């Protein structure tokens, strides 16, 4: 039988979010561990605690709808988390790694903001006031986390750029030091050939 009602869509998306949040509970500790910034690590750890609360709220919402709290595989979150894992596997260090972690975390937040915005709106439309309040609370927390990440990114991106510029200058200095030696070696070979 086709799922044809807004209520069925609502429940389906709640299950999708339940799976997504549970996946995040597993992924966030890896991101925190990889962070080199104490402030970023602390922020991720705080959001991990919030994410655990989001799982509990989703259980409460599903229960209030007389539905079992089970997840429906969330391919969207799976893809975003896979992309984040790939960023962590790259050869980034220091602030550049932290900038990559923030990029991955904000993709997660934007996905969640979109999803919670929809289910909150549907809860209101369906007259599920308790569910709407709980979902709105989570939506606001996701927005706050995104804003904190943006603020942190401004600091970390600046540091990452400074570190990158410093490394580029070192590489240029190394190349300049190697160049005169190569020129001297070529001159020596030319003199030998002429003699």
Image (spheres, grey):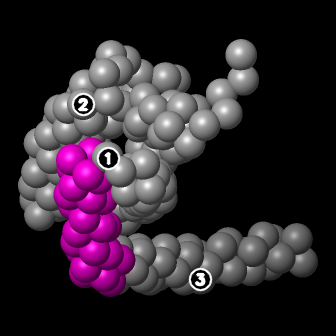
Q: Quadrant of the C terminus?
A: bottom right
Residue beneath the point at 30% across and 67% down: 143
- Mark 1 or mark 2, which has the lower sequence index? 2
Q: Give the residue pinned by disc 1.
A: 128
- Neighbor class of circle 3 (other Cα within 10 Å; few <14, some 14-19, many 20+) is few
Secondary structure type for disc 1: loop
- Neighbor class of circle 1 (other Cα within 10 Å; few <14, some 14-19, many 20+) is some
Mark-to-mark CA distance, 1 and 2: 9 Å
Mark-to-mark CA distance, 3 and 2: 76 Å
Mark-to-mark CA distance, 3 and 1: 76 Å
Looking at the image, is mark 3 or mark 2 nearer the viewer? 2
The reply to whether residue 137 is visible in this rendering is: yes
Secondary structure type for disc 3: helix
Q: Pick the residue in front: 119 or 42.
A: 119
Q: Pick the residue in front: 47 or 187.
A: 47
Residue beneath the point at 21% across and 47% down: 130
Name the spot of residue 10 as percent of width and height, x first.
48, 40
Q: Give the residue pinned by disc 3.
A: 180
Q: Is residue 82 left or right of residue 31?
A: right
Name the spot of residue 96 as percent of width and height, x first.
37, 64
Range of the magenta residues? 129-158
Secondary structure type for disc 2: helix
Name the spot of residue 29 as percent of width and height, x first.
22, 36
């Amino acid at each position: 039988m086709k799922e044809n009602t807004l209520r069925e869509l609502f429940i389906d998306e709640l299950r999708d979010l339940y799976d997504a949040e549970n996946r995040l509970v597993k992924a966030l500790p890896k991101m925190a561990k990889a962070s080199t910034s104490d402030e970023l690590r602390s922020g991720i750890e705080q959001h991990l605690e919030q994410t655990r609360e989001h799982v509990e709220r989703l259980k409460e919402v599903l229960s209030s709808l007389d539905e079992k709290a089970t997840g429906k595989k969330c391919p969207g979150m799976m893809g975003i988390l896979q992309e984040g894992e790939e960023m962590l596997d790259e050869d980034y260090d220091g602030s550049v790694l932290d900038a990559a972690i923030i990029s991955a975390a904000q993709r997660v937040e934007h996905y969640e903001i979109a999803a919670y915005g929809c289910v909150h709106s549907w809860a209101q439309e369906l007259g599920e006031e308790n569910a709407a309040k709980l979902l709105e609370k989570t939506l606001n927390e996701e927005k706050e986390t995104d804003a904190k990440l943006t603020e942190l990114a401004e600091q970390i991106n600046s540091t990452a750029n400074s570190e990158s510029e410093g490394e580029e200058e070192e590489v240029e200095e190394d190349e300049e030091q190697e160049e005169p030696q190569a020129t001297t070696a070529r001159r020596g070979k030319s003199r030998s050939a002429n003699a």
